[in-house]
Amino acid sequence: DIQMTQSPSTLSASVGDRVTITCRASQSISSWLAWYQQKPGKAPKLLIYKASSLESGVPSRFSGSGSGTEFTLTISSLQPDDFATYYCQQYNSYWGWTFGQGTKVEIK
Amino acid sequence: EVQLVESGGGLVQPGGSLRLSCAASGFTFSSYWMHWVRQAPGKGLVWVSRINSDGSSTSYADSVKGRFTISRDNAKNTLYLQMNSLRAEDTAVYYCARTLEATPMEYWGQGTLVTVSS
């Protein structure tokens, strides 16, 4: 099974900061990686798919990069609405769908 | 508008059973793979199970294999999760979500809470 490891687990940042979250896969997943945002009591929301493609309607301050085993989610200028928990996920019909453990972005 | 609405959650004793449903609308249900994802209180997202578009292929997380059964009724646009031999560690909000064969989960339901406790 493919394992997904995110870092950090918690991140304290201020409005306007540039934020980067890392996700590592236990084996190469090409670009089969998505990023989700989840707020308390709500379902996750898809932000990025295929490692770097922005989902329709998602602000351009969100970007994704990487391939193989190492990926990053970057928020270029953190906004008040961005304080949430972020999850990476590998998706592939052969390997299945596996989430990282999550990164909580908190107000500094 | 795509809608996924889960139901069937509740309080159940350890060893008991529960069947969750996910009613789909706003899209051609029979064209999509469907998944169940759960989230224990204060914890992260965990993929539970998936079923392909015609129901001929299923897959499960090791933690639920042999206890949970995913199924679908394409005529009723409904996804199911039959949960047997429930344990305290199955306590979670259960979400349904749709994908194609190799796509991320772009639509999710609002979730239904399952609590396993005596």
Image (cartoon, helix red, strand yellow):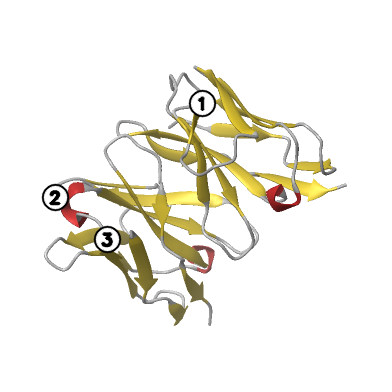
Give the residue at mark 3.
B26
Left or right side of B57 for B13: right
Q: Position of residue A91 (x, y in %)?
A: 40, 35
SS class of the residue under badge 1?
A: loop
Look at 18% across and 48% down and name the residue there. B31
Q: Is residue B36 above or below residue A7?
A: below
Give the residue at mark 2.
B54
Q: How many marks?
A: 3
Q: Position of residue B59 (x, y in %)?
A: 29, 46
Q: Residues within 10 Å of mark 2 (few under 14, many from 20)?
A: some
Q: Is residue B65 visible?
A: yes
Indicate which disc residue B70 carries: none
Q: Position of residue B84 (x, y in %)?
A: 33, 69
Give the residue at mark 1.
A52
Which part of the image, by quadrant, shows the N terminus of chain B?
bottom left
Q: Position of residue B24 (x, y in %)?
A: 28, 64
Query: The residue under label 1 is which amino acid type?
Result: Ser
| Nearer to us in this view, A6 or A58 | A58
Marks 2 and 3 share the same chain: yes
Label 2 vs label 3: CA separation?
18 Å
Left or right side of A20 for B25: left
